[in-house]
Amino acid sequence: APAFTVIDVNDKSLSLEEYKGMWVILDFWGSWCGPCRQSNPHLVKIYKQYHKKGLEIIGLALSDTREKSVRAMTEDGITWRNAVINEQEDETAKNLPVTYRITGVPTKILIDPNGVVQVIEVGVKEESEIEKILKENLK
């Protein structure tokens, strides 16, 4: 998975490198995106189930504002770190959707503890391949 550093909604630096050795879901989403918001309760459930076993989620909001993202996070019970991509000053951070070849939201990318992309899921999935892999690996 391509490395990156962004500034999160709390003005703190957030780097994928910080989570080396953990399972990570990159969640490309938007507060304005109905399917994204629809999938958030399921993602919250996965986070609660697997976070203490070694899962982290990084939210990457697209075409959004910090205020709207934070409001959606509060409403949806999102407690993991988030960054608003279009508000990044660094060009590499702004280009993350291109780097990760994002074609639509929601897109969830599962990265294994070695930093290798295992699954890319676009849209809302009833049968999540990500969840199957986490279930097998985080007991």
Image: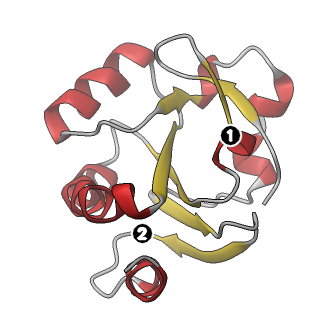
Where residue 123 is drawn, which disc sits there?
2
Q: Kindly identify which residue carries mark 1.
A: 18
Taking depth in this image into account, of 129 and 99 the one nearest to the observer is 129
* The residue positioned farthest toward the left in the image shown: 75
Taking depth in this image into account, of 44 and 40 the one nearest to the observer is 44
| Quadrant where the C terminus is found in the figure | bottom left
Report the amino acid beneath label 2.
Gly
Where residue 48 is drawn, which disc sits there?
none
Q: Position of residue 100 (x, y in %)?
A: 74, 56
Report the amino acid beneath label 1.
Glu
The quadrant in which residue 53 appears is bottom left
Give SS at disc 2. Answer: loop
Residue at the (37%, 56%) spot, across then down: 51
The quadrant in which residue 4 appears is top right
Using residue 39 as the reference point, say whether residue 114 is left or right of it: right
Q: Where is residue 1 in the image (x, y as percent from the top left)?
A: 78, 60
Sort mark 1 into few (<14), some (14-19) or many (20+) by Cα contacts within 10 Å. Answer: few
Q: Taking 28 as reference, is 136 above or below it?
A: below
Residue at the (46%, 27%) spot, across then down: 64
Using residue 102 as the reference point, say whether residue 122 is left or right of it: left
Closest to the camera, between mark 1 and mark 2, is 1
Residue at the (48%, 52%) spot, across then down: 56
Q: Which of the two labelled residues, at mark 1 and mark 2, occupies the earlier sequence position?
A: 1
Give SS at disc 1. Answer: helix
Taking depth in this image into account, of 115 and 70 the one nearest to the observer is 115
Q: Taking 59 as reference, is 70 above or below it?
A: above
Q: Position of residue 16 (x, y in %)?
A: 69, 43
Residue at the (64%, 47%) spot, across then down: 19
Using residue 39 as the reference point, say whether residue 20 is left or right of it: right
